[in-house]
Amino acid sequence: MKKGLFITFEGIDGCGKTTQARLLAKVLKKAGHEVLLTREPGGTSLGKRLRQLLLNPNSKVCAEAELFLYLADRAQHVREVIAPALKQGRIVISERFADSTVAYQGAGRNLSRKRVEPLNRIATAGLKPNLTFLLNIPLSTAQDRKANHPLPADRLERLEKSFHQRLAWEYRKLAAEEPRRIHLIKAAGSIEQVHQRVMKALFKAYPTLQKGDSPTPSQRSKKK
Ligand SMILES: Nc1ncnc2c1ncn2[C@@H]1O[C@H](COP(=O)(O)OP(=O)(O)OP(=O)(O)O)[C@@H](O)[C@H]1O
Ligand SMILES: [Mg+2]
């Protein structure tokens, strides 16, 4: 059974997920919480190998194979890393999770959300994040940020603009459908400004975290 708190960061490439997830983990750790920072793809040793296959620009991967590779990564990640950490009452922060597959493979690759969602449920074993921060910035801003990045563009980042437009649109649709879980965070502005928006949304949803308390009421009562 889930006891901890599961937080995910989502958004288009270069929107600031890694930067903001690291900052959030640092602040929560400092406040005394047990935090696990992880990412998809690549949160397990199997996942690390899948990540190389998925992001290597030289990999020849059709859309359907791409979908199943991401799902394989997620299935292993949930069972090996995320679920056990939540069971221990930790705060798990993941860069990307099931919403990425709906956006990238469902909308971006045109595999259809209707087909992708049941497969996602198998991969996640029904696990859903408590809170998702969708970092929202214009495509051009994200691309400018990536242009300053030392790493070369990966296999998906090299895709045409319409691919990225479709997935950005799908992300906003998801946020509109699930406003309680998915918090749309304006991700333009400085790293610190975006971080403050994330913290504000987090404390609004989980006010007890501000005091360094355990994430869920059930854990607090168990502690006493
Ligand atoms: N608010 C910001 N203002 C300016 N630059 C930023 C901001 N946030 C992040 N960056 C920079 O933009 C680049 C992309 O950020 P980051 O790697 O965090 O994005 P990401 O969403 O994790 O990207 P990816 O999808 O490739 O993993 C990095 O070089 C980072 O330092
Ligand atoms: Mg990243």
Image (spheres, rainbow, N blue to C red):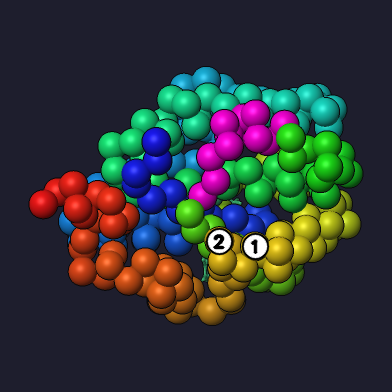
The image quadrant of residue 156 is: top right
Label 2: which residue? 181
SS class, disc 2: loop
Closer-to-camera residue (154/110) = 110
For disc 1, the marked residue is: 178
Please say if the residues under marks 2 and 1 sit with CB atoms less than 8 Å apart. Answer: yes
Which amino acid lies under the numbered mark 2 shown in the image of this protein?
Arg
Give x and y (percent) for residue 86: 36, 40
Q: Amino acid at mark 1?
A: Glu
Residue 196 falls inside the magenta stretch: no
Q: Residues within 10 Å of mark 2 (few under 14, many from 20)?
A: some
x 74%, y 50%: residue: 103
Distance Cα–Cα, label 2 vs label 1: 6 Å
Give the residue at x 19% y 53%: 221
Count of numbered marks = 2
The x and y percentages for residue 66 are: 75, 30
Q: Percent x, y for residue 207?
A: 32, 71
At mark 1, the secondary structure is loop
Q: Is residue 120 highlighted in magenta?
A: yes
Range covered by the magenta-colored residues: 119-129
Q: Callout 1: few (<14), some (14-19), or many (20+) C-alpha neighbours within 10 Å?
A: few
The N terminus lies in quadrant: top left
Seen from the viewer's position, the closer of residues 155 and 120 is 120
Q: Residue at x 28, y 57 (%)?
A: 217
Residue 1 in the image: above or below residue 27:
above
Q: Position of residue 88 (x, y in %)?
A: 28, 37
Residue 88 showing in the rendered view: yes
Residue 15 in sight: no
